[in-house]
Image (cartoon, rainbow, N blue to C red):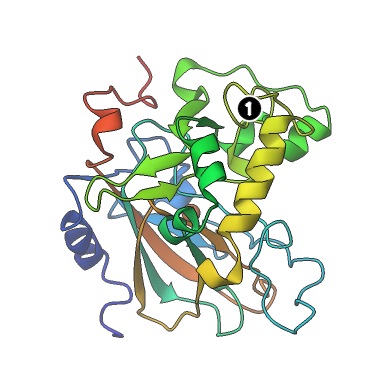
Amino acid sequence: MGAMAGDAGLLLRLSRIFGPEVENYRETGMAANMVHPEVPEIFVVSNTPPALRQPPALPDPPLTAEGRLPVQFPHRRGWHTDQSYRRPPPDVSLFLGVLPAPQGQGQTLFADGTAAYDALPPAMQARIEGLDGLHVSSGHGRKRDAVLAGEVPKVLAPHQAPQRQPLVRLHPVTGRRALYLCEYGQMDWLEGPIAGLEPGPHGAGGALLTELMAHLTQPRFVYVHEWTEGDLVIWDNRCTIHAATWFDADRVRRIMWRTTVSGNPGPAYAGEAKSWIAA
Ligand SMILES: [Fe+2]
């Protein structure tokens, strides 16, 4: 396993097994300090220089009443699926623990959108069929906290515009339905988060999103990955969501590498131009 950790070329070759397009982060405008210097298909998630990315805050309270790691929204925050603010969205992410946090910190949480969809009452399944979420990246003044704080939203270029994604995604390989949504930070809380429903933090769309997200992140649908150096976790963004957890960044150096693979989003996206490429 030790040989794997740090082998950027091998991670890229592995990534290509999962789809025709491995994102080149230099071409898609990622800040240079977050991109691997030799292999621009690798996004570096690290609190060490030059990336200097800090971990999420501890949940409040840090443990559940039973003394467990909190996973359920809204106690646990940060649940998302990668780059859902783009159309077509990516298929698969690969995440390599080059230098992970010690066990008990810096876990990655995954929630199973297929099982959670199947467990919804039929009336809720019928209610959300055909609805779209409105997804946007977090830096534009449209996330829930920014809207609640009355931040003035940034003027968006066309390639930054919020994107509609089905709340219920039909998986192109399995043919199964899965919940597909993010929470406060990666949805548009100005015009959404659900297209066609009353917008804003206090609207009907926000209430529905909150209800679905709490359902989807129940412990029975969640896997907690405790990292060991050299672990490679591969997930399907089309049918799972994930969240990062806190680690003690004052004492812990953490280096993780991620690649993102696209190319099979399903027939709903057939033939679409890439929303994030500036015309
Ligand atoms: Fe992510």
- Does residue 170 sit above or below 9 in this rendering? above
Q: Amino acid at mark 1?
A: Gly
Picture layout, residue 29 above or below residue 174? above
Q: Position of residue 190 (x, y in %)?
A: 69, 24
Residue 61 or 122: which is nearer the viewer?
122
Residue at the image position 35 percent from the left and 79 percent from the top: 230
Give 238 or 38, whichever is nearer the viewer: 238
**Which SS class for mark 1?**
loop
For label 1, the residue is 192
In which quarter of the view is residue 182 placed?
top right
Residue plotted at (74% across, 67% down): 58
Q: Is residue 206 toward the left or the right of residue 122 in the image?
A: right
Q: Is residue 261 left or right of residue 35?
A: left
Residue toward you, 249 or 60? 60
Q: Residues within 10 Å of mark 1 (few under 14, many from 20)?
A: many
Does residue 143 appear in this view?
Answer: no
Taking depth in this image into account, of 136 and 164 the one nearest to the observer is: 164
